[in-house]
Amino acid sequence: MQLDKVYAPQHFEPHWAQWWIDSGIFQASVKPGAKVFSLVIPPPNVTGVLHIGHMLEHTEIDVTVRWHRMLGENTLWLPGADHAGIATQMVVERKLAEEGIKRLDLGREEFEKRVWEWKAQYGDTIKRQMIRLGTSCDWSRERFTLDPGLSRAVREVFVRLFEKGLIYRGEYMVNWCPRCRTAISDLEVAHTEVEGHLWHLRYPVNGLPGRFIVVATTRPETMLGDTAVAINAKDQRYFEYHGKTAQLPLTNREIPIILDDMADPEFGAGAVKITPAHDPNDFEAGRRHDLPKIQVIDDTGAMTAQAGPYAGLDHFEARKRILADLETLGVLVKTEPYKLNLGRCDRCQTVVEPLISTQWFVKTKPLAEKAIEAVETGRIEFIPANWAKTYYEWMYNIRDWCISRQLWWGHRIPAWHCANCKQITVARQDPTRCAHCGSDQIAQETDVLDTWFSSGLLPVTVFGWPPPPGQSTPDLDAFYPTSLLVTGFDILFFWVARMIMLGCYFSGDILMPNGSRPPLSETVPFREVYIHALVRDADRQKMSKTKGNVVDPVQIVEKYGTDAVRFTLASMASPGTDIAFSEARTEGYRAFANKIWNAARFIFMNVERAREAGIEVDSSLLSKTPTVGANAPLEARWIVARLNSVAAEVNTALGTYRFDEAANLVYQFFWGDLCDWYLELVKLRIETAASEEDRIMPFLLFNGVFESSLRMLSPFMPFITEEIWHAFYDGRPPARSIALMPYPISAKGNIDEAAERDMTQLQSLIVAVRSARKDAGVPERESVPVLLRAADASVFQQNLATIQRLARVTTLEVVPQLPDGLAHRATPTFDVAVVYEKPVDANAERERLTKDLVKLQKEKENSDRQLGNESFLAKAPAQVVEGIRRRNSELTTLIERTRAALDALPRE
């Protein structure tokens, strides 16, 4: 048994990170009849690098996965990466630009080859980082959304949706990114409120000399594409204009004045210009009134030939010139400030342009119905539960999903256009002829599918669906539906909702290709969705590169060790609450790891001493649940009881995704109960033992509890626990890894409430004596007598040696009343005072007691308020109310004793 003198995680973490991969201990296999826990990673973009949000997510997943594995479940965490169509294409185009090459110069086939080359060289950054940080994935099953098997599944689902009439192609208004040169979905548009302007323009009414109709617009450059002016039928100001035409300024066109409810009499001047080619609402109005669509802005954001003298200008530059010309003509009536909800491409931040385009769409209503039902019936549960409401709001108002993207990188849409009959053939296998007229003059659709279409199918495609002809899908049968999804709220609609829609709609077909339906509970992609919080900086500000407050987890890991960073994130991961990441707190948890390291070194040093004395410690006993007899010393019965109580609480917390509670329970037990208290008591027993046998018994129990504690800590701090655990068994461990050992659970026979209660009393007395010593100015190394007033002092008398050692006490005398003038402490069950010649500073003692009294009274007022609140009493759990009542009673006693102590002090 040997550990380095200094805790240096950088020395052993890389070794275990690689060993876990090489050993294959996290590889899952099909085990008929075994309880299964499965989970698919939220696939990071192939272009990405690890950020602190990833590390929070991966920590929460890894803690959960390791815990389930240690519970003996057949556990699978399946990793993968997303091809990230737009992001990856942008990165590669940027690299090509550095070489002076454009994508169009290369051609599609050569460009795709270059992307694959880039992916092979740079695309696994997050994977390498995840391995280094110890995530317990089954890397042998790693998937990529453009893998052949996944691509086959994507095509199969596209074809099935098309055959069911749920995929269609049509001309609609879409969000267009002029920088990425592709359509993007509503979810990929980031809206921000900005200061803008509202321009009022005067359009002459033909046939009525000197009469005008005023329209207000935030985008004057689009007026060149106006094809009507709308007025409201209820607006008497303009009703006489109905049926007439207006003269469109800067052009020679007349446009009709129509009635439509989209004209709001309260907005602007009450009339609105209709530009069907450049606004979603105008597009629908154009359909209602059969208006022509004139496109004056192209897909690069430049003005088209339809814009006349402004053709070729960027549309923002065109706006300036058009406004100047309108003002010259006397058409610009006024300009007023106006707040705009400006949409930008979430990927490149370019202002999005609404454009009419022919795209492919999914009819989402039929899919949404099943997805809503899955959550309403409880087959899928959101945690925290409030996210279900957000999910419903979006699903009930869902719009058809534009799934085509004008890119070269991605799943190419399996549709072929016929030059002869102009029909479209959608097929599972590449056709050679048109399915409608038989012509061989067919060409495949150039668009690719939205990245979220393929990632939305991951829960089934990663398990081998659809199987090759004649083959089965044992992985799908074993691990689907997955147990859990852990992800951020930012992709709740991008990914989570789409997985639920596609999974619920297709589960019957996917699971039972022979036509029989699976049980209703199986028609979901996962059973629980845990939405984690956002990681903010220490001042609770959102992290951003512009603010310069982004935390690089790799740098923090190098500084403090992976375990400390993981524990920081886990201990702060309270559901529904954002995390304010603090480096100071991480430093504190590194100190925690150091405490564990030193405790292990204490064990190893004493094992060596035992060997030198001819006693060999049987390490095979260490992995067994520690037990003690009824006659064992109090601290032995107490530490075993605490171990079992904490194990029960930690298992409950992890089962409800309270990572913060679980981490803090383990921390308090390991640092407080085990190291600060029990370790000191073990040292005392060893030093005062009459024989080698008496000396070795408490040491063995400490070892057993320590080993159990390592297993309890392992999911949170896998590196240090693996390192110590292997050293613990001196090369002969009972399993290949601590990660494969049983997780500590509570053994009811070892719950000893009396021992816990007595030890709590003993600890309270020792802490009280230490505080009183400090108040009395007793030198650190000097021991003093103490006086005790208590209704029952038996536990203190039975453990006098412990009190003498840990509180530096010579004698403990039980008295009916404490004399005045001594430094003392009061608790609900006893009063204690130290006897020391140095007189107590009455003024300082009065100040201290007065502060204590104010604090106790304030706590009592809060407690009284809670107990007087009928609404609170009706809703709060019974044990919580009982705890408040018990504390309220204690406070009454403490207030009385503190007042009595104040009254007993000598007056000035």
Image (cartoon, rainbow, N blue to C red):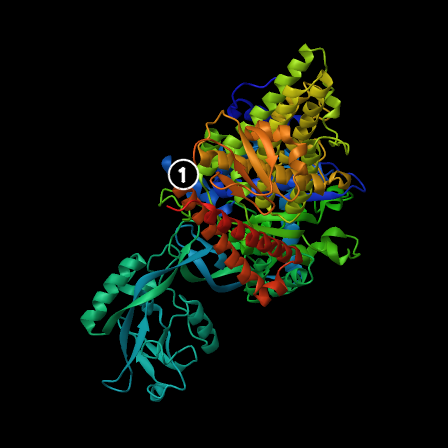
Pick the front one: 216 or 248 = 216
Q: Is residue 824 visible?
A: yes
Which quadrant is home to the C terminus? top left
Quadrant housing residue 520: bottom right
- Specify the amino acid type for callout 1: Asp
The residue shown at (67%, 37%) is: 795
The residue shown at (53%, 32%) is: 592
Q: Is residue 56 visible?
A: no
Element marked by disc 1: loop
Quadrant housing residue 807: top right
Which residue was labeled with disc 1?
841
Picture coordinates of residue 61 (x, y %)?
60, 42
Picture coordinates of residue 227 (x, y %)?
37, 74
Picture coordinates of residue 660 (x, y %)?
57, 45
Task: Say whether residue 184 is left or right of residue 514.
Answer: left
Q: How many marks?
A: 1
Q: Residues within 10 Å of mark 1 (few under 14, many from 20)?
A: some
Pick the front one: 654 or 465 = 654
Task: Say whether residue 60 is left or right of residue 246.
Answer: right
Task: Say whether residue 119 is left or right of residue 151.
Answer: left
Which quadrant is home to the N terminus? top right
